[in-house]
Image: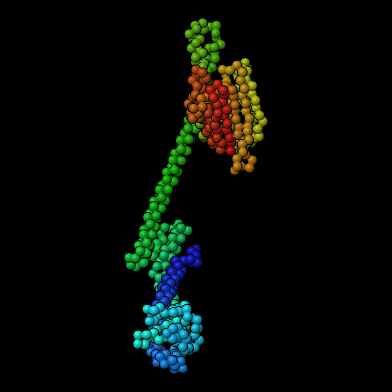
Amino acid sequence: MRPQRNDSLSARLTRMNLIVSGAALLLAACAFFSYDLLSFRSDLIRSLDAEAQIVGQNTVSALVFNDPQSAASTLQGLEHAPDVLGAMLTTGDGTEFARYGAFDAGEAESRVLRREEADHFWSSGTNVLVAHRIVFQGKTVGVVYISAKLTEIGRRARQYLLIAGIILMFCMAAALGISAASRRLIAQPIIALADTAISVSRDRDYSVRARVQAGSSEIAVLVSAFNTMLAQIEGRDAALNEARNDLEIRVEERTAELQTANRELEAFSYTVAHDLRGPLDAIAGIVFLLTQSDGEIADSNVQFMIEQLKTSTHNMGALIDDLLNFARASTTPVQWAPTDLSAIVRGIAAELTMSDPARKVEFSISDVPEVQADAGLIRIVLGNLLRNSWKYSSHHAKACIEFGAIQTFDANEAEGKLVYFVRDDGAGFDPSRMEQLFRPFQRLHGKSEFPGTGIGLATVQRILARQGGSIWAEGAVEKGATFYFTLN
């Protein structure tokens, strides 16, 4: 879409040319008019002063011989001066001697020549009063006053305005022509460059180029630099696409390698299950038979070795089971189905109680809603967590193991989310070593305190991650531990 032109560069250039031309013309007209006004006013005052001198020379005899009628006839000759309103002739002591036209005698009384002045004028707006002293034989015999109105100035002002208006129209037309040329030379290349930039931004097509203007002006340099930038972006974009394609190929290759490795790991797990479990079961059977012949084996060293063999066989079986579960956590396909977590926990709790009926352990199992999950994998999760609680509370005379869920609320979720937990009051753990909890073969307690392989929690974390969940823990030394986990 082309950009809106309501306030385009060409419109701005046109306005600028019109404003500059109009302002220059108005300033020039004002300057010429002011100069002409001052010049015309000065010329008019000089002309009135000359007429006053002529009238003074022509009325000397009338003043000397006291002939007002002759003086009035002389003043009557001013009727041919277009700007003169009236005139008055006074004697040397200021007494009115003769008058012509609409002359205000009071104005002459307020405008008195000083002793040393021969001529003087007074002006107020367009009204001018000129006074001339009449001297005969070194003695003042009278004063002539001529009153005029500068009506010619208004006429000349109207002429100036008319001429200035006509010139302004021609200047505006010339400014429009100059603006059209400016658009071709300046605005249109920049507008074309803006259109190209919008097209590139919209279509992401960096192969587009702006048309370079002839010459070496700043605009041509700008367009050339813009095209150079597009070429650089196009090159980088091509390099990025090539790198992305190469990365996708490498990811596919690595994914295939990982899938192959997972299949090999699964095959290895089954090999462990079939090839090692059989001999281990045979050894366990021999150990069982040996333990049943107590009367025939009297040597205490042999009995100790049989007990050690029994313990090692049991630990190796547990390690094989944990390794199989760890492998299944990553390779076994998830079978989604409605799963009753509380029922699974009750079954595991019953198994633990039967394994050691002498222990005083209280199970508190809450009923939680069914979830969509893989029942087999979830049983491994709950089994590891509950067996850990059973194991790490074994040094206490009485213990309590609790399973339940709490509702959490999130601003982005209308109904919140259920967080499940397994809590015990056993040995707990050091919170500063929290990051080691879910690492394979990492143990926070020695084997002499609590037996185990260190794989259980890593298996739990893998299984929950595959089902869109997570796990974390809280605890303190000898204050128990609580493991929280979520499901998708």
Residue depicted at x 53% and y 12%: 290
Is 6 or 457 nearer to us in this picture? 6
Residue found 56% across the figure and 11% down from its top: 292
Q: Residue at x 43, y 72 (%)?
A: 23
The mark tally for this picture is 0
Q: Is residue 36 left or right of residue 460?
A: left
Question: Is residue 185 among what the camera can see?
Answer: yes
- The quarter of the rendered structure image containing the C terminus is top right
Tell me which residue sits at (46%, 58%) in the image.
201
From what the image shows, is residue 273 above or below residue 18? above
- Dividing the picture into quarters, in which one does residue 428 lie? top right
Q: Position of residue 248 (x, y in %)?
A: 44, 46
Residue 422 x, y percent position in the rendering: 59, 28
Q: Quadrant of residue 285?
A: top right
Q: Is residue 269 visible?
A: no
Q: Is residue 313 above or below residue 404?
A: above
What's the colour scheme?
Answer: rainbow
